[in-house]
Image: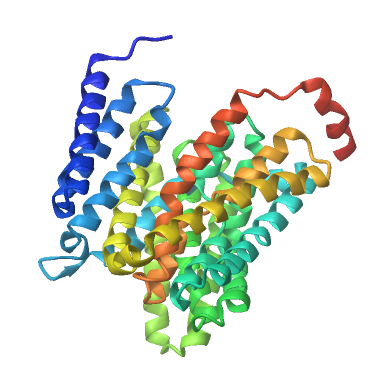
């Protein structure tokens, strides 16, 4: 067993002292003064865990807790700074995160649909049936207010995110299937998520199908397209013919998005052309320029870019959750415990039902683990962005804000447990042969 570094011991000691002071202040009736010590507690834990490989993966979650604590005790800076509404940062941050996701993918990641059709089909069926239905059921059982109930359905109706890929890697599951499922679910989200919201959440809040579709395309699809075209050029792994074909396909998707926008919102032709040109510049021309520049300057070394994008994504998620927490602080304080409990049940049922549904269809153990993680780990960031676009970030956005940090704890715990339970290759062979 490796020795714990001195700096980790000091920080963990600081977190213990902060915990003791917090407990003392809480039971002495001075709850208002616990804020700084709770923030110090989680910050010290997040930093201290960096030196301990076994629990290093939980560091990000405790950074989230520190940020959420700050936004709960001191909400104003997370709501408005110098007349600037902080919630306006949510969509741009999500677009940056989605661009980062797309830049680490390529069109080849979708070939799993052909190579693993059974796993992809079952995974998609589980993804877009189990979580929406469970979310709706829990919202009704717990009797949440209408807009908060809609947030549960929204979390369940969202696709999986990059977290599922990370957890699948930790769990030594079927990483290729995980990446394929995330990619396919994300691309299907503009159609499936609004449909599920219309069917299941329509009784809670008014749902505009086309506006939600356009929001998802803007927040997810176009930034991922930008990332894909950047990847195709920057890393030099694809032929010019492939890049040209992708460029025309992506141009068609941008055109389709603007056509939907034109027909549903009755835009004037001048407004349509302006939006179309803006999308081409932002999501096609700039990524091409950036890809060419990166290819020339990086000289084949892309490791630093992955690190930068990973840091930006984690920081962006922390900021988004903090802004949503501050916006919905009053509602969160009022029903906080019930909301946390419902999100925990929602999350864990996703793992459980996803895993055993796959077992029922006789998928191999690695694929069962993968789909369980894909089902249980949702793209809370996208759900938050949709809640903002709906104009209900302080209510509909609460369930995604709670679900996000929680799934990182449960997901990493489950993945670590599975990692310690290696798959017996001999037992897997009959099931793998049955699939082929």
Q: Is residue 387 above or below residue 423?
A: below
Q: Which residue lies furthest to the front in this view?
A: 28
**Where does residue 385 sit, x and y in percent of width and height?**
41, 65
Residue drawn at 23 percent across, 41 percent down: 23
Reply above or below: 245 against 147.
above
Task: Judge whether residue 272 can be spotted in this image.
Answer: yes
**Horizontal side, residue 368 vs residue 230: left or right:** right
**Percent position (x, y) of residue 281?**
37, 63
Q: Nearer the viewer, residue 309 or 174?
A: 174
Residue 311 lies in what quarter of the image?
Answer: top left
The x, y position of residue 212, in whole percent, is 50, 74
Viewer-side residue, 300 vs 418: 418
Q: Quadrant of the C terminus?
A: top right
**Quick one: quadrant of the N terminus?**
top left
Which residue is more in the foreground, 314 or 305?
314
| Left or right placement of residue 427 versus residue 38 in this view | right
Residue at image coords 45%, 61%: 338
Q: Which residue is at 83% across, 25% downward?
A: 427
Judge from the rendering whether residue 104 lies leftward or rightward of residue 310; answer left or right. right
- Is any part of residue 108 visible from this angle? no
Given residues 415 and 245, the one toward you in this image is: 415
């Amino acid at each position: 067993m490796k020795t714990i570094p001195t700096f980790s011991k000091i920080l963990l000691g600081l977190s213990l002292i902060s915990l003791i002071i917090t407990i003392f202040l809480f039971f002495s009736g001075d709850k208002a003064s616990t804020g700084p010590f709770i923030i110090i507690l989680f910050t010290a834990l997040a930093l201290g865990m960096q030196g301990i490989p076994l629990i290093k993966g939980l560091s990000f979650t405790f950074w989230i807790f520190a940020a959420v604590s700050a936004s709960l005790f001191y909400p104003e800076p997370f709501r408005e700074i110098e007349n600037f509404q902080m919630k306006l940062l949510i969509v741009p941050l999500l677009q940056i995160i989605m661009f980062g996701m797309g830049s680490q993918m390529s069109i080849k990641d979708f070939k799993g649909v052909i190579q693993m059709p059974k796993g992809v089909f079952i995974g998609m069926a589980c993804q877009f049936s189990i979580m929406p239905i469970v979310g709706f059921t829990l919202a009704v059982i717990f009797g949440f207010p209408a807009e908060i109930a809609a947030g549960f359905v929204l979390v369940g109706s969202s696709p999986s995110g990059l977290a599922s890929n990370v957890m699948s890697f930790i769990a030594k599951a079927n990483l290729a299937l995980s990446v394929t499922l995330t990619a396919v679910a994300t691309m299907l989200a503009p159609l499936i998520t609004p449909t599920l919201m219309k069917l299941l959440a329509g009784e809670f809040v008014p749902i505009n199908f086309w506006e939600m579709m356009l929001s998802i395309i803007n927040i997810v699809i176009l930034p991922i397209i930008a990332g894909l075209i950047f990847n195709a050029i920057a890393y030099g792994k694809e032929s010019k013919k492939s890049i040209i074909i992708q460029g025309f396909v992506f141009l068609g998707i941008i055109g389709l998005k603007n056509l939907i926008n034109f027909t549903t919102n009755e835009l004037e032709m001048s407004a349509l052309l302006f939006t179309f040109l803006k999308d081409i510049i932002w999501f096609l021309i700039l990524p091409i320029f950036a890809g060419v520049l990166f290819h020339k300057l990086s000289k084949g070394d892309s490791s630093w870019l992955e690190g930068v994008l990973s840091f930006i994504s984690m920081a962006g998620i922390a900021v988004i959750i903090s802004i949503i927490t501050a916006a919905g602080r009053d509602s969160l304080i009022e029903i906080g415990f019930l909301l946390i409990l419902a999100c925990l049940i929602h999350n864990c049922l996703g793992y459980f039902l996803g895993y055993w549904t796959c077992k029922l269809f006789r998928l191999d153990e690695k694929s069962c683990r993968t789909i369980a993680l894909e089902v249980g780990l949702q793209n809370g960031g996208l759900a938050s962005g949709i809640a903002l676009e709906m104009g209900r970030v302080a209510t509909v956005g609460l369930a995604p804000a709670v679900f996000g940090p929680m799934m990182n704890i449960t997901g990493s715990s489950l993945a670590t447990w599975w990692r310690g339970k290696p798959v017996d290759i001999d037992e897997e062979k009959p099931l793998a042969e049955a699939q082929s």
